[in-house]
Amino acid sequence: MVRDAALVKGGAKLEDQGLLFDYTVKFLLVGGFLELVLYRLVSRLGMHLAKVAEKHEWVRLTFRGLSSIGFSLLNFVSLLLFLALSILLLNKIRGGVSGRFDRLLVPSLSLLVVLTIVFLIFPSAMLGSVLYNLLSAVVLSVIVVEYMRSHVLPRQRLMILCYTLGIFSWLYYQIVSTSYGLLGLVSVPPLAHEVNRVGEALMVLASILVFWAYGGTPLWSTNRRQRRRSLIFIITGSAAFLSLLFIDYLLAQYDRTVAENVRKAGEGIGWIFQMGMGYTFYLPFAFYVTGLLCWSYTVIKLVTVGRLAGYGLGLMFMAGYALQLSHLTLMVILGLLLLNLDRKRLLTPARDGIEMPVVPAATTQLAGGRA
């Protein structure tokens, strides 16, 4: 009798999904990063340096040019997101919508994409914003449930759970705040600010857990190179975390004026990231830097080998915490879909003892992938 399928090390590669999808996601990752830096961060930095820009004309022109490039990149990223999601939906429809998750995901995600296009042409009011966020929560719930069923490693489930609860915290904050405004209520919604802060903490925790879930190599691994890299990163990251955690105290002991200047600089950085990504930096600065290092190391490691998970994690965390723009919501959804596609390949022994590959449905050739 044929035995149960066994898992093979390594996940799905980006090139397995077709040529068009391959280049779309690659350009999307680069474009999303540049849009984050040039539009959501640099443009806010220009607002923060308004007084300097008034004194120096070249500063004002530089920030205006960078902001214009960033805004163009925003439109470019939005088009790539529509293309990537359309390819995935078309692939699921052509392959037959038979799974319980696809039966829910395809119509709900299709409706979300259509609503996004409609709201770009006709800007939505408060009611439209509430409906859009509710539909986004439904789509995210379906994708996350599918992820939990297809990924058995506890560390990966824990990371996705923290990330999802963080995103849902933001959606709750947006839905209840907008609903109160729609009803004309001036009181503060119940637990709105508390949930918002808890969600930010969960997002930071998820960015740290990414290294454990996808990027870290066990110290008992036989791959000496990967084991050495992980060990060096853990030591370096731990040293940076402890240094940043006690830097304020050490600077205060050295010179209170220097410590005060560093605090003001930290407040300026926090303001920029709050406007661009939604992080208020109410937690110790060391946690945010540690999360950034863990996320960067994991994404670079996975993208280097072409893993779908690397591109998915890159898009998810580049979207930030505050999904104030519709393309950021679609970026999170596409990132989670890529994580679901990044399933380990299955091998099942044939009757003659030879192992034959079992290709999961997620690796079906996508539209536009053939020459």
Image: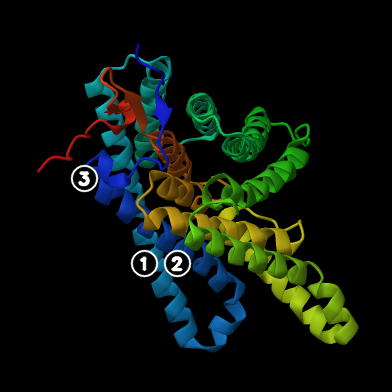
Going from N to C along the chain, the mark reached first, 2 or 1, is 2
- Residue at the location (33% across, 30% down)? 362
Q: Quadrant of residue 348?
A: top left
Q: Residues within 10 Å of mark 2 (few under 14, many from 20)?
A: many
Rendered image: mark on residue 38: 2
Pinpoint residue 52: horizontal percent, then vertical percent: 58, 83
Task: Tell me how far mark 3 sits from mark 2, CA to CA.
Answer: 26 Å
- Residue at the location (34% across, 37% down)? 117
Which residue does the numbered mark 1 point to in the structure image? 69
The answer to whether the residues at label 2 and label 1 have Cβ atoms under 8 Å apart is yes
Q: Secondary structure at mark 3?
A: helix
Establish if 317 lies above or below 242. Answer: above
The number of numbered discs placed on residues in the rendered structure image is: 3
Circle 1: residue type: Ile
Q: Residues within 10 Å of mark 3 (few under 14, many from 20)?
A: some
- Residue at the location (41% across, 43% down)? 10
Which residue does the numbered mark 3 point to in the structure image? 20
